[in-house]
Amino acid sequence: MNATVLENARIVDPSRSLDEVGTIIVENDRIVASGAGARNQGVPEGASLIDCKGKAVLPGLVDARVFIGEPGAEHRETIASASHAAAAGGVTSIIMMPDTDPVIDNVALVEFVMRTARDTAVINVYPAAAVTKGLHGEEMTEIGLLREAGAVAITEGRNSIANSQLMRRALTYARDFGVVLAHEARDPYLGSNGVMNEGLFASWLGLSGTPREAEVIPLERDMRLAALTQGAYHAAQISTAMSAEVISRAKGNGLNVTSGVSINHLSLNENDIGEFRTFFRLQPPLRLEEDRLAMVEALRDGTIDIIVSAHDPQDVDTKRLPFADAAAGAIGLETMLGAALRLYHNGDVPLVRIVEAMSSAPARIFGLDAGSLRPGSKADMTIVDLDEPWVVKEEDLRSRSKNSCFEGARFQGRVVQTFVSGKSVFEI
């Protein structure tokens, strides 16, 4: 029997609204005791002891929006390299988007992801399947079969569904098969040529903009369709104060609706683009500071359910270009927690709420065995020194791509060790 005992830890477990100093006892791959009184149960014979004095133990983080290059663009990121990057960021479970080549739109591709992850990844990798074949927005995939094969969600990934009838049908199928439809609302015509947020700053830079209405209008439509179908709808990434109002209203009306925000939109605004830095070319684009503050408030009050990294590896061929020609996207698995802890240190959002948004909440929404430190749970956890300062350096990033919004950023709070099923998969 493999046993590990974590002593003197600040245990932060949102699934039990717990934040207390105590002990966690792990036997084989499960947590058998966790909390202030766990030490009274005695230490298993031959157990490894880890003194966590001055450190916090969090449930392994769950990142519900991760793009990976495998299959088709392994030079940007493989399932294996993404898993090592995730472990370094305290992330023990990821939901992989279907935007691959070929697209994850059939059972064979779902099985390929699961098999490759089992053979090469050090963390849990869950595939999300495409809503439409080839992500073309026309013909629906076999949602029931994909769900049965192991897909934990259906989504168009980076794409948006313009066809309202198709969206209605997909939400109906999602309801009947008990799966969540995660959608990034984006009008295909309004600001379709925009490369950053529409406004004064875009005009100064001479760049075409995307208005905030390009997100809000299709989101309003989606809420109507969620009400019509009673399907489970997840707004994958919202970025504007108006969108938060739409989600808040839908929740108030009792709809089965949840929402996420990327760590980039909690941490950055359009001014960070500065001198046309393409690592800040994102989708949705970075918005006004007022919108960023609205995202923080929506996270704090629960309108936004989860934080995602929106990890999207791009290489020099797609980023070392004029801003308007560069691909959108940034990596984020290794920096998501560090950036989120800024909100804790400056008093904007309580620690338990931040951890909930990156562990128990996404696990609950997508039905994953993750995100908890309660006895009986899988021993996925991360030890974090909440106060240790560190600087993000390109050479330290484990991702195959280096397009980080946070290169050179100074963070306070660093992952010391990560466990998956009781086994250490990362240690400083």
Image (cartoon, rainbow, N blue to C red):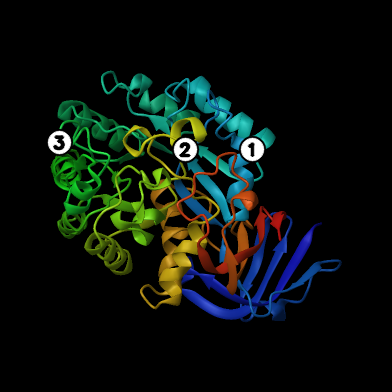
Horizontal and vertical percent position of residue 319: 45, 36
Residue depicted at x 33% and y 45%: 236
Residue depicted at x 62% and y 54%: 88
Which residue is label 2 attached to?
A: 67
Horizontal and vertical percent position of residue 202: 22, 48
- Could you say which is closer to the camera, residue 363 or residue 268? 268
Q: Earlier in the sequence, mark 3 or mark 2?
A: 2
Horizontal and vertical percent position of residue 72: 53, 23
Judging from the image, what secondary structure is the residue with disc 1 in?
helix
Horizontal and vertical percent position of residue 239: 27, 52
Q: In this view, does 30 lie above or below 125?
A: below
- Outermost residue on the right side: it is 46
In which image quadrant can residue 210 be found?
top left
Q: Which of marks 1 and 3 is nearer the N terminus?
A: 1
Judging from the image, what secondary structure is the residue with disc 2 in?
loop
Around disc 1, counting alpha carbons within 10 Å, would you say few (fewer than 14), some (14 to 19), or many (20 or more)?
many
Judging from the image, what secondary structure is the residue with disc 3 in?
loop
**Which label sits on residue 190?**
3
Which residue is label 1 attached to?
A: 80
Q: Earlier in the sequence, mark 2 or mark 1?
A: 2
Foreground mark, 3 or 2? Answer: 3
How far apart are the alpha carbons under marks 2 and 1? 13 Å
Left or right: 383 with respect to 353?
A: right
The quadrant of the image that shows the C terminus is bottom right
> What amino acid is labelled 2 in the image?
Phe
> What amino acid is labelled 3 in the image?
Leu
How far apart are the alpha carbons under marks 1 and 3? 38 Å
Left or right: 321 with respect to 121?
A: left
